[in-house]
Image (cartoon, helix red, strand yellow):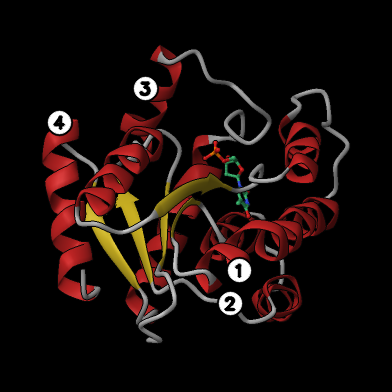
Amino acid sequence: MNPERGCFIVLEGVEGAGKTTQIPRLAAWISSLGRTVITTVEPGGTAIGRQIRAVLLDPANTAMSATTELLLYNAARAQHVSEVILPALESGVFVVCDRYSDSTMAYQGYARGLDRDMIGALDGISTGGLKPDLTIILDLPVEAGRERNVSAGKSDRLELESAAFHERVRAGFHELAAQSEHAVMVSADGTPDEVHERIKHAVSERLCL
Ligand code: TMP
C-alpha cells in the first residue's frame, strides 16, 4: 500500500445489518487516530448518483429490467469513483463507503441471477480497477434485518423483494467473503457498541492504523 495514499474501506451487508449506524462511528474512530476521513454512499455519493438512486429505489419502477438495474448501479459507481473516491484517496484521505462492487455481485449476480463474469467485466469499466483495501460484510439473518427495517419505516424497491431474494443476497455475501482476500465477515448481531468493537478489531488487524 502506498503510504501517501488513503485507505479505502467498504461496509456491505443485507438490509438492516446496521451500516448506517456503524459508518459514522467507524469514521469517528479513524479520525481519532489522526487520519483525515470521509464517509460516502452507493448509490448516491454524488449529485448524479443521488438522481440515479431515486430511479433505482422508487417502488413505482416495477418495470425495471435486471440489466437496466445493473447498468444504473454501475453508472452511479463510475461517477462516484472519478468524482469522489479516487481524488480523496490520492490526496491521502481515508474513504469509508456504504456499499460498493460486492453489493452488485450479491444483489444483481447471486440474487437476480445475472452472469457474474459479465458483472465482473462491467465492474472493471466502472471502477477503473479500483478495489477496496478492506471490505467488512455485516452479517445478520435476513428476518432480523427486515424487522429492523420495518421498525425504521423503510420500504424501497429492493427492500420490497421477497425473503428468498434476500436469502440469496446473504448467501452471495458469504461466498464473496470466502473467496476474497479483501473481505471479512463480521456478525451484526448484538448492540451497536458490540458491533463497533468487532469492526474496529477487523480494521486494526488488517490495516496499519
Ligand atoms: P442501502 O439501502 O443500503 O442504501 O442500498 C440501496 C439498495 O440498493 C439496497 O437494497 C442494496 C441495493 N444495491 C444493489 O442492488 N446493487 C448495488 O450495486 C448497490 C450499491 C446497492
Q: Nearer the viewer, residue 103 or 92?
A: 92
**Quadrant of the drawing holding the N terminus:** bottom left
* Image region (quadrant) for ligand 1: top right
Calculate the distance from the C-alpha at mark 2 to the C-alpha at mark 3.
Answer: 34 Å
Give the number of the disc on residue 191: 4
Name the side, left or right, on which 49 lies relative to 39. Answer: right
Q: Secondary structure at mark 1?
A: helix
For the residues bearing labels 1 and 2, Cβ distance under 8 angstroms? yes
Frontmost of labels 1 and 2 is: 1
Residue 94 image position (x, y, % from top left):
41, 61
Q: Is mark 2 within 8 Å of ligand 1?
A: no
Mark-to-mark CA distance, 1 and 2: 8 Å
Q: Mark on residue 86?
A: 1
Q: Quadrant of residue 110?
A: bottom right
**Lateral position of residue 123 relative to residue 71, left or right:** left
Which numbered disc flags the more N-terminal residue, 1 or 3? 1
Residues at marks 1 and 4, CA–CA distance in whole angstroms: 33 Å
Circle on res. 147: 3
Cβ(mark 3) to ligand 1 < 8 Å?
A: no
